[in-house]
Image (spheres, rainbow, N blue to C red):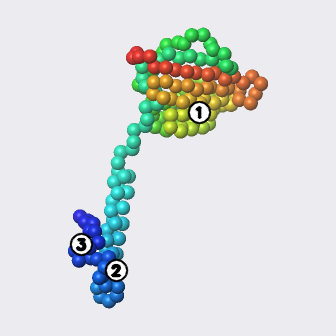
Amino acid sequence: MIALLPLGSAGIQPIGQGAPTSGPEMKSRISLAIVAAGGLAAVLVLVAVVAMLRPAAKPPERLQPGRWAVATGLNGQTLGTPTSTCITAQDALAANGTEDDIAAAARREGAAQSCRVTQVLIAGPAITVDMVCQGQPARSSMVYRGTSYEGTMATGIGRPNARVIAMKGQRIGDC
């Protein structure tokens, strides 16, 4: 056990308050300081080891499972009224999982759409997936807020036939 003692306790006095500045007593003060510094180093190492052994933080819940109203638009135009869909806990892992979970979900979904995922970027509630679909670059950019989300899916980036689909979702209850 390491005990930290304030200066002045156990006969240790700070320099300038009657403490020796040379000789054998000063050597023992220096030795005590080295032991204390070694003790501090041991405490710092212990803190680092405990921090490494702590379980990893749970990924944030960006998207809550439940019934959602989803509205879409193409190139700035609204496409009808919102549709209702059920997002299961398994579906929500595509937004809530670890970085590896999210990248794996993006690759599965991309493969189902004949797309190859080239990059997945995660910054807090924002997830951006770059991909190539049928030879054309595409990007999905979504921002999740637990009970709502919004984002875009752009295809044919930099080409005359480029399209941007805007999406907004709002959780409206349980499935």
Q: Tell me if I can see residue 111 in this picture.
A: no
Amino acid at pointer 2: Gly
Instruction: Out of 112 and 17, give the one closest to the viewer.
Output: 17
Write down the residue under mark 2: 16
Q: Secondary structure at mark 2?
A: loop
Please say if the residues under marks 3 and 2 sit with CB atoms less than 8 Å apart. Answer: no
Vertical order, 113 against 59 (above or below) = above
Q: Residues within 10 Å of mark 2 (few under 14, many from 20)?
A: few
**Between discs 2 and 1, the one toward the N terminus:** 2
Across and down, in percent, residue 72 comes to 59, 17
Residue at 46 percent of width and 37 percent of height: 98
Residue holding disc 3? 9
- Asked if one can make out residue 125 in the rendered structure from this viewpoint, the answer is yes
Percent across and percent down for residue 51 are 37, 52
Could you tell me which residue is drawn at 26 percent across and 76 percent down? 12
Q: Residues within 10 Å of mark 1 (few under 14, many from 20)?
A: many
Disc 1: which residue: 129
Q: Which of these two is toward me, 60 or 87?
A: 60
- Residue type at mark 3 is Ser
Give the class, few, some or many, for how many residues have Cα within 10 Å of label 3's Cα (few <14, many ≥20).
Answer: few
Q: Nearer the viewer, mark 3 or mark 1?
A: 3
Q: Measure the alpha-carbon separation of dots 3 and 2.
A: 16 Å
Residue lying furthest front: 17
Question: Sequence order check: which comes first, mark 3 or mark 1?
Answer: 3
Q: Are marks 2 and 1 in contact (CB under 8 Å)?
A: no
Quadrant location of residue 155? Answer: top right
